[in-house]
Amino acid sequence: MTKEAHTLWPSEAAVSDVVGRLMEFWGFKRNMGRIWAVLYLSVEPRSAEDLRETLKLSSGAVSMTLSELLRWGVVRKVWVQGERKDFYTAEVQLWRMISRVFSERERSEIKFAIEAFEEALAELDVLKRSDDAKTRERATLQYARIEQLLELSRLGQKLLDALLATAKLDAEPLVRFLLGREKSPSSSHVS
Amino acid sequence: MTKEAHTLWPSEAAVSDVVGRLMEFWGFKRNMGRIWAVLYLSVEPRSAEDLRETLKLSSGAVSMTLSELLRWGVVRKVWVQGERKDFYTAEVQLWRMISRVFSERERSEIKFAIEAFEEALAELDVLKRSDDAKTRERATLQYARIEQLLELSRLGQKLLDALLATAKLDAEPLVRFLLGREKSPSSSHVS
DNA sequence: CGAATCCTTCAAATACTTTTGAAGAGTATG
DNA sequence: CATACTCTTCAAAAGTATTTGAAGGATTCG
């Protein structure tokens, strides 16, 4: 009961490719995107072997990529009736996926930056009172500039939080806000 | 009149490093971030040589990185009184920088994806009317799924547009929207 | 014009990332 | 418990991206 090799339709191949590129753009491995996309477009769950054949990857690559996708919670293992292999499906709730990634990855990135900026400000605050005029000037300018960076980072953080809240409450306020300034009448709700 | 080698303060080094990492995270070269940050924190314009020494890079790297930064419009050449060398300053309008990058890069990325999804939908629309029941099922499911991807992409595009509009009107509506749901009383306006 | 200075380019070197596939661990089956 | 099958791991290979530095242009200065 092996060898359901499965050829992709051109549209499937194209979508997998685009999703792969998008994911790569967002800092993941291209194959993560491709595998996810194939699963996302699949009627039934797929086995690792199946994916290996469909996408022409090595067994190792499939195994590693799948476990990464599992860690990100964007793919799930499913138990299939009397099959020895593991089978996989894609998370189809796009918002849930995205918010998971954002809240783990971008959030920590920005948090780190914010902390670093705050520390730098604290150091500069001391130097701003230096005896040396040159030092004072330099410290003062840098203080102001870093404040800007910090403010921007905080804004980014808020935007992120707003997005995440949105994801949880199922795409309400932000979507409405955005659509409020558009001509489109669609009652947009992305799963 | 050469050799103002310029050592970075710890806070400067830290900030340059963090900005470098952030930029790397956003898909640029780390050195782009580091160079920009050094310029951003500098009281006066800096020469390429100066940057080369401060950051311990090769002349080639500095030249190439600067020209990339110039292309992105996040660094500018300035003419300095009776100096042979070129001098550089950072764009300090953070919003302007970001909106420039977003509108060139993320926008085209998302546009490409949207087009690909639309094409895939068109192809599947034909297959949905296939004689073969299996084919119909597969095409129908994929159609629905890709519609979701498309909807999400369009949402992303709108979000991007809203951000860009915001940047142009100088951080008004979006910032207000975001702050509207926060406790902070700050009258936030990032340059 | 010739020398000096500065900038750019690019092939080669280095550093980093991803993929491969064989070895081995784990597990169900007869 | 031996066999067959599947999944994981990991060192080596392949593939990418970045950096270097020497060569060559361009510009200014005397």
Image (cartoon, coloured by chain):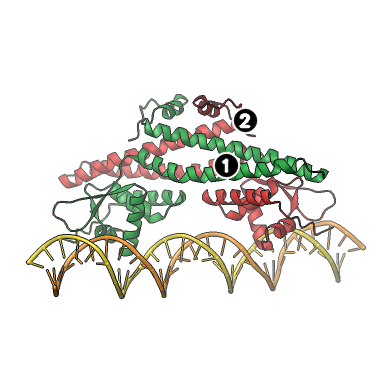
Chain colours: A red, B green, C orange, D yellow
Q: Quick check: B80 above or below D13?
A: above
Image quarter in which the C terminus of chain A is found: top right
Q: In this view, does D5 lie to the left or right of D28?
A: right
> Looking at the image, can residue B63 be seen?
yes
Q: Identify the amino acid type marked 2.
A: His
In the image, B181 versus C6, the foreground residue is C6
* Label pair 2/1, CB-CB below 8 angstroms: no
Residue B31 rendering spot, x and y as whole percentages = 37, 56
Rendering quarter of residue A73: top right
In this view of the protein, which residue sits in the foreground, A127 or B53? B53
Question: Can the viewer see residue B57?
Answer: no
Label 1, residues with CA under 10 Å away: few <14, some 14-19, many ≥20: many
The numbered dot on residue B114 is 1
Question: Which amino acid type corresponds to the residue marked 1 in the rendered image?
Answer: Ile
Secondary-structure class at tag 2: loop
Where is residue B41 shown, x and y percent of the image?
28, 47
* Residue closer to the observer: B183 or B85: B85
Neighbourhood count class around disc 2 (C-alpha, 10 Å): few under 14, some 14–19, many 20 upward: some
Q: In the visual, does B38 lie left or right of A14? A: left
Q: In which quarter of the image is residue A155?
A: top left
Numbered circle sitting on residue A189: 2
**Closer-to-camera residue (A143/B179):** B179
Q: Mark 1 lies on which chain?
A: B
Rendered image quadrant of residue D30: bottom left
